[in-house]
Each structure stands twice: as structure tokens, then as C-alpha cells.
Amino acid sequence: MKSMLSRIRWTIALFIAPLVVALHRLGKPQGFECFNAINPTTFNPVPLLSHDDDPNWKVVRYPFTAAGGITLALMKPGYLVKFNAGRTGVLPAVGADDAALEGVCIDVGGTDVANPNDTTVAVALSGSFDKNTIKYADGTSPITAAGLAALADHQIFLDPAVPIGAFAP
């Protein structure tokens, strides 16, 4: 059973996140600047969130390299990625890459108005996600048992979530 503090944090996060996104959609407050951060107008994590009390995401932005016909334009939040050989960037991951799965794409580059040539993606390296929204980079799902095990080894957990209905912690 989750602690009361964890439940309170989760409840606060559910109410604050939409407010932050709404503020950014209305325009930046005076004197506010996001220095090379994930673009707040395109980053909306709610559809990917697990119904776990504490999603505990660790997010890092990496350069993206197209592979197997999957380009940055085809990548979507919730698609799986793997690291390149030098671990300096990420590649799209498909079903044959189950052993190499290491992250979930949560924001796609090229959406920042200030930097349209951005070829990076924000990758969650740990955390819990809604199993219904996570797919291989070619759009296929469900993730195989071997893929789920590889993700769990990297502290990425896919929880079965109720597709409809109100969330009640």
C-alpha cells in the first residue's frame, strides 16, 4: 500500500501539470525562459502516465538517428528506443530489438519553434507507464514478454491501466 504522502504528491501533480501546460499555451509569463528544455507546448505526459501512485520518471534528451526506415518524423511519444553503440544517441526499437530496449520516447525533436532543426528526443530512462500507450517504434504492440523483461531491468515498468473511467487512487 502506498503511503499517504505518495498519494498526496500524485494528487497535486495531477492538478498542477494541466495548469502548467495551460500557462504555457497562453503565452510565456514575463521574464520566464525555458533554456533548452523540453518544449512545454508539445510535452504532455498525461496520456503516457501509469496509474501507479508514483511514476518516477527520469528523462534525458538524446540525439536521434533514423534506422530501419523509421525517421524522426515517424516517431511519436510512447515509442520505444534503444541506444547506439557509443551510447551517445538513440535509435528506434522494433520487436527484434527486445534485448536492447532501454527507453521510452516522450517528446520528439523538431517541435521547438526556436530551433526547428532539433533532432533530439526526450527519453524516459526509468519510470512507470500505461501499457496501452507504449509501442515499438514501428507502431506495433503489445510488447513481448522478453521486451517487458528488458524494460523492467532498466526500471521501466508498463502497468495495465483501465482504458476508460475515472482514476481513484
Image: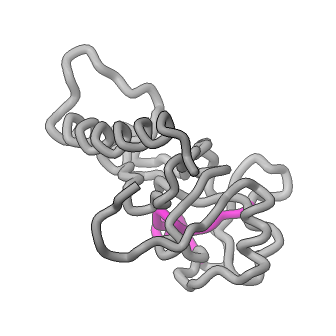
Q: Position of residue 136 (x, y in %)?
A: 60, 76
Q: How many tags in the picture?
A: 0
Q: Which residue is painted at 34% across and 61% down in the image?
A: 167
Toward which corner of the image does residue 11 lie, by quadrant? top left
Q: Position of residue 123 (x, y in %)?
A: 59, 51
Q: Position of residue 138 (x, y in %)?
A: 57, 80
Task: Answer with left or right where residue 121 lies relative to residue 82.
Answer: left
Identity of the residue furthest to the top in this view: 31
Toward which corner of the image does residue 8 lie, by quadrant? top left
- Quadrant the C terminus occupies: bottom left
Viewer-side residue, 19 vs 10: 10
Position above or below: 128 against 15: below
Q: Position of residue 50 (x, y in %)?
A: 49, 60
Q: Which residue is painted at 59% across and 84% down in the image?
A: 142
Q: Which residue is painted at 38% across and 49% down in the image?
A: 43
Viewer-side residue, 137 vs 45: 45
Residue 9 belongs to the span the image colors magenta: no
Viewer-side residue, 18 vs 122: 18
Q: Which residue is painted at 52% across and 81% down in the image?
A: 139
Q: Which residues are magenta?
A: 70-82
Position above or below: 51 against 96: above
Q: Can I make out residue 69 in this image?
A: yes
Viewer-side residue, 75 vs 118: 75
Position above or below: 80 against 140: above
Task: Answer with left or right where residue 50 lies relative to residue 158.
Answer: left
Task: Answer with left or right where residue 72 lies relative to residue 94.
Answer: left
Residue 79 belongs to the span the image colors magenta: yes
Q: Can I make out residue 120 in this image?
A: no
* Colour approach in the figure: one colour
Toward which corner of the image does residue 10 lie, by quadrant? top left
